[in-house]
Image (cartoon, rainbow, N blue to C red):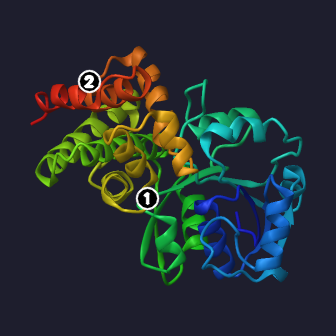
Amino acid sequence: MNIPGIVAILGSGSWSTAIAKIVQDNDADIWWYMRNPQKITEFKQLGHNPTYLSSVRFDLSRIHFTDDINEAIRNSDMVIFGMPSPYLKQHVEKITESFDEKLVISIIKGIVQDLNIPISQYLTERFTLKPGQFATLSGPSHAEEVAWERLTYLTVGCTNKEIGQEVADFFQNHYVHTTVSDDVIGVQFAGVLKNIYAIASGICSGLKYGDNFQAVLVANAMREMKRFINGINPEGKATRHISESVYTGDLLVTAYSRFSRNHMFGAMIGKGYSVKSAQLEMEMVAEGYYGTKCIKEINQKYGIQIPIVDCVYNILYKRMSPFVEFKLLSDMLR
């Protein structure tokens, strides 16, 4: 499979915008689907995304904007899904175009709501994708740092390593380094879990627990991530190394960085904000909020010990006191 030069980007958030920058810097043309026509108009007038990463200027002559998701898919060979996971299904339900011979990429670090299945399973079943036709792009990668061209390492998860390498080569440039993994399930669940642990880290900050406890929390989160992913997907256990950047690296950057919206959301909760008030003030989607409920429900089948996820769930969904829940959690950590 030769990676094409025409790419559809579905979504207009900060990470989709950062990916669009990489794609255009790598000399590919873009069909860019944005749900809001007004946003398209403003983008064309300004030469940049009016809402996210406004410092990134684009060559508009090489971008076709559309508010018709099917038009974007029809005119491209690679389709990148980049909308937040809570809204994925409502966009997918509008799609009537065939994905025959198209490469499908997910940059979503979330899980399909209500169905509680990874993006790969949902899109593969929904569009009858062939083996190797789907890939996921993940790793420690804040959109803001991509916008500034700071060195970033991304991992392409694909069951076909040859195709995965071609995708990796497509995204690589002077500020993006890429590697390939066939652990598609593990990579996706790591992307979900690290957001939950970032919320936990933020709650700690809001409660003023300090760096010493934060380090213990994150160390336990690493072990919890390994335990959960190996428990639900034992097939990949032999070759899965949680210490790699796509697992632990992504956890660390999301737990500690000032750019982490999940950490920010958690810090608000720790300071006493309600879930609703924190969401309204952020005006951005904290994927970890939705991922917490999904992982909790998935674990009803497996019964894996995930005390940090349980703690965050109790705070966000059962409205338990963050102070009390973290006191109980602190007695379990080591």
Secondary-structure class at tag 1 = loop
Q: Is residue 207 left or right of residue 77?
A: left
Residue type highlighted by circle 1: Gly
Say if 189 sits above or below 205 in the image.
above
Which sits in the foreground, 95 or 315? 315
Which sits in the foreground, 292 or 301? 292
Mark 2 residue crowding within 10 angstroms, few (<14) / some (14–19) / many (20+): few
Q: Is residue 309 left or right of residue 69?
A: left
Q: From this viewpoint, is residue 105 visible?
A: yes
Q: From this viewpoint, is residue 238 visible?
A: no
Residue at the image point whose x is 40% and y is 19% from the top: 318
Mark 1 residue crowding within 10 angstroms, few (<14) / some (14–19) / many (20+): many
Q: Position of residue 45 (x, y in %)?
A: 82, 77
Residue receiving disc 2:
305
Secondary-structure class at tag 2 = loop
Q: Quadrant of the N terminus?
A: bottom right
Residue at the image point whose x is 45% and y is 53% from the top: 261
Q: Position of residue 13 (x, y in %)?
A: 64, 58
Q: Quadrant of the C terminus?
A: top left
Q: Position of residue 103 (x, y in %)?
A: 71, 55
Residue type highlighted by circle 2: Gln
Say if 281 sits above or below 226 in the image.
below
Residue at the image point whose x is 62% and y is 37% from the top: 86
Q: Earlier in the sequence, mark 2 or mark 1?
A: 1
The picture quadrant where one finds residue 271 is top left
The tag on residue 51 is none
Q: Position of residue 275 (x, y in %)?
A: 47, 34
What separation in Å lies between label 2 and label 1 (alpha carbons)? 25 Å
Residue at the image point whose x is 35% and y is 27% from the top: 315
Residue receiving disc 1:
139
